[in-house]
Amino acid sequence: MNSSIEYIGEHIWAGKLGNGFVVLSFVAALLSLIAFCLSTKRTEYLSFARITFKLHAVAVLGIAVTLFYMLLNHFFEYQYIWQHSNKSMDMKFILSCFWEGQEGSFLLWTFWNVVIGLILNRILKNTEWEAPTMAVFALVQIFLASMILGIYIGDYKIGSNPFLLLREHEQYRNMPFIQNPNYLFKLDGRGLNPLLMNYWMTIHPPTLFLGFASTLVPFAFAIAAFWNKKFNDWQKLALPWTFFSVCVLGIGILMGGAWAYEALSFGGFWAWDPVENSSLVPWLVIVAAAHTMIINKNKGGSLFTTHFLSIAGFLLVLYSTFLTRSGILGSSSVHAFTDLGMTGQLVMYMLTFVFISVVLLIHNELIKYSYIIGSLLIWFFSLVYGYQKLALEIWCVGSAIMTFWAYVKYFPKEKEEEALYSREFWMFVGSMILLLIAMVITYFTSLPVINKLFDLKYAQLKVQEYNDFILPFAVVLVLLIACAQFLKYKKNNAPAFFKSLMISFGLALAFGLTASIPLYFNESKLETYNKIGYTSILITSLFAVFANLDYMLRILKGRIKKSGSSIAHIGFAMIMIGVLISTSKKITISKNTTKQNLTELSKEFDNQKSMLLTQGDTVPMGPYMVTYKGREKVGIDYYFKVDYLAEGKDGKLEYQFTLKPKIQDNPIMGTAAEPGTKHFLEKDIYTVAYADVRTQIDSATLGKYKPPTNYVGHIKDTIFAGNAIIVIDSLRTNVNEAEYKISDSLLEVTAVLKAYDTQKNIYTARPKYIIKNNTQIPGEYIVEELGLKFVFWKINPEEGTIEITMSERVGNSKDFIVMEAHLFPFINVLWLGCIIMALGTAIAIMERIHQIRRKHA
């Protein structure tokens, strides 16, 4: 970069302001950490700790406001603004631009942590939990603030700065356009990723990151418990926050599924993508933590498990951050960010909190300092000698051993085992199943990491393989959801317990078996494992719905405020039913009925499931007849109008509805298909279209002819053109055989071709084949009305055939698309279940808050 150039129009003040806020955010968080740590011993530091945390909050807000202002005003001199927005983009997607990049999403996460931290600090003010809990928050904020610092210490880069000038970026600083002082005059941004130009992406990321941020609360309480060496009491304070995390993170994940269903073209809402999984796993663990907290609150049990799950939930969020942002997933995920060189920083972020958790769990000072020194020596050894993989493996094994030893040595144990027929026992079992599911998913999701660590080449599981692995766990989990609430804490009367479930189970068995016979057992292509598994999950899910409804109405007497968990369980069971039926009975209604090999057009097409639709043609597709009516361009979007018709009572085709799947054509980032979906009460019709939207043909080219195709035929044979059917009607000659044998005779053979267009109009073509003095002269004939050119060039007397080439005018070609269409039955059960589960969780949160307030009133 030439420092002597005086650039015109740059808003340098914005970058300086933003960088000032970034530095202030980091420094204030660091001071807040120090002050809160000191406050655990001396309370006079609390005031300073609170002030610095609030100053950190102001700085974070300043960063966000500055970045938004730069996006709104198109300050393309800054790399982040140029990379993620442009002038032609719809302003409603400006929020998506903010968090599309790594820097923006880290900032979003930081912002939510600040909001939660300020609320929590107010709740915990002047309590024994304030200083250690807020110290954990401050430490997390230091790490997150470092992710957007963008400074170098020696050769090591810390963070990626969103306020970096484009001309200072190492990738662009030597570009020719940067040498122009007025380069901003014509500069436009690259724009938003086409897949993110969807309304779901304005609400899904902030909801998901609020869910991620909320997992910090139970983690901070658990660490504070280790710090204070008080393993009880915090659970009651953390329980509403844990349910809040379950609710918000769950909604965020489901929003991601809705986005995938509406915006991505893989044909569904969940693909077991590594990034999807890395969000699901923390949710499963936090759900398990919430249930063990309830056990602890009511019976004082599951103490270590509650701490472990609360810590693991947040650590798994950090692990998902590593997976998503380190670049290690490569092409195995469509959601992953590219590597910005922060892999080491992300690993350090994750391992630091594992280290802190283990250190605080150890009470013996000698062993604690031995572990600390040993960890530092392993880290130093890996830096000096380069055996990072070996060092990491040794440290992880050592940390696991120390955790187990500390649990056995120091952690309070339960005096008596839970009774077999007790609510706490089966809630604990359910939590362990959730943890086991999380571990299974984590293992398969981590295969890219395992491959890299151990130089292996394990392949990612396919969707059906994931489903088969998870199926038995899901059956047991839903069964527990049905039964557990009917159990009381401590001992229960087994006969009375089973009697209370008989009606619900009988209804579930009757409805489940009745539905499973036509759905699964009559399906010859379905494996026996799947028949049994699908039937089991259907019956147990129905059992969970009926049992929780029965518990809510009969035991709780319909009191909604007390029914939060029952309502949430009903919603979860409905999700399982919706997922089961909509995926297992998903029907592909598009089918390739032509002789055209669609894989010749693109290897992405499925030659069995994709179908070719030519403009104006009406063809069968599942229960419908469909007509491709043409395309419409709106901005950078191409909409493909497809009419759906069905046979009416009088046998005539009647219009039903129109779908407009679209392709977004981003000139920089390429094309992206977006489905068109028709929603019915009992099903969805889901369609994806593929078409060439970039080939533009000028008027001169339209009048030219395509390369000829040769046809060998007998009299009355048929030739098919794009707009007509041609019949070889007859052959006529100008001389008979005797006349032709006379010297210098000219033989002229005319092929009479009858061409029938789509309107049944008849056109006649008469190409001639001439032989003069043993010289063959092919004759050409053009039917202008049809844009067809025929050349009669050969006669095969022995076979009784003639050979004719046909060329079609370029302008004859009709517009066409390749489309896939799927039918998802009863998918609305899934979406309704999502709403009910979120509603039930929200009711449970409010009830927990009321309980705490009543206790402290």
Image: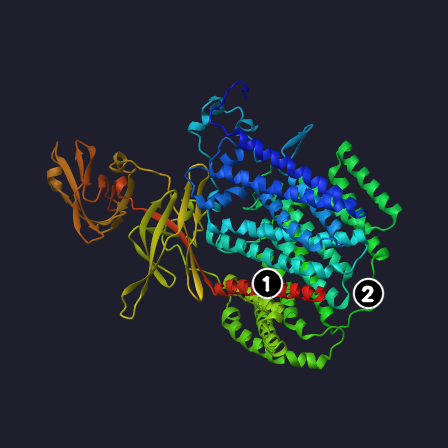
Left or right of 640 on screen, residue 265:
right
> Image quarter for residue 768?
top left
Q: How crowded is mark 1: few (under 14 residues within 10 Å), some or many (20 or more)?
A: many
Say which amino acid is labelled 2: Glu
Total residue callouts: 2
> Image quarter for residue 555?
bottom right
Residue, disc 2: 414
Q: Residue 499, image x and y in percent?
A: 66, 81
SS at badge 1: helix
Image marks 1 and 2: residues in contact by CB distance under 8 Å: no
Up-down relation of residue 632 to residue 286 (above or below):
above
Q: Residue 564, image x and y in percent?
A: 61, 68
Q: Residue 682, image x and y in percent?
A: 44, 67
- Please identify the residue farthest to the top as the structure is shown: 4
The one of 261 and 489 positioned closer to us in this rendering? 489
Of badges 1 and 2, nearer the viewer stands 1
Locate the N terminus by quadrant.
top right
Q: Residue 269, image x and y in percent?
A: 51, 56
Mark 1 or mark 2: which comes first in sequence? 2
Left or right of 801 on screen, residue 309:
right
Residue, disc 1: 842
User: Real-space Cα distance between discs 1 and 2?
Assistant: 31 Å
Say which amino acid is labelled 1: Ala
Query: Does any portion of residue 265 appear in the rendered image?
Result: no
Left or right of 654 on screen, residue 125:
right
Q: Which residue is drawn at 82% across and 50% down?
A: 402
Query: Does any portion of residue 462 appear in the rendered image?
Result: yes
Q: How crowded is mark 2: few (under 14 residues within 10 Å), some or many (20 or more)?
A: few
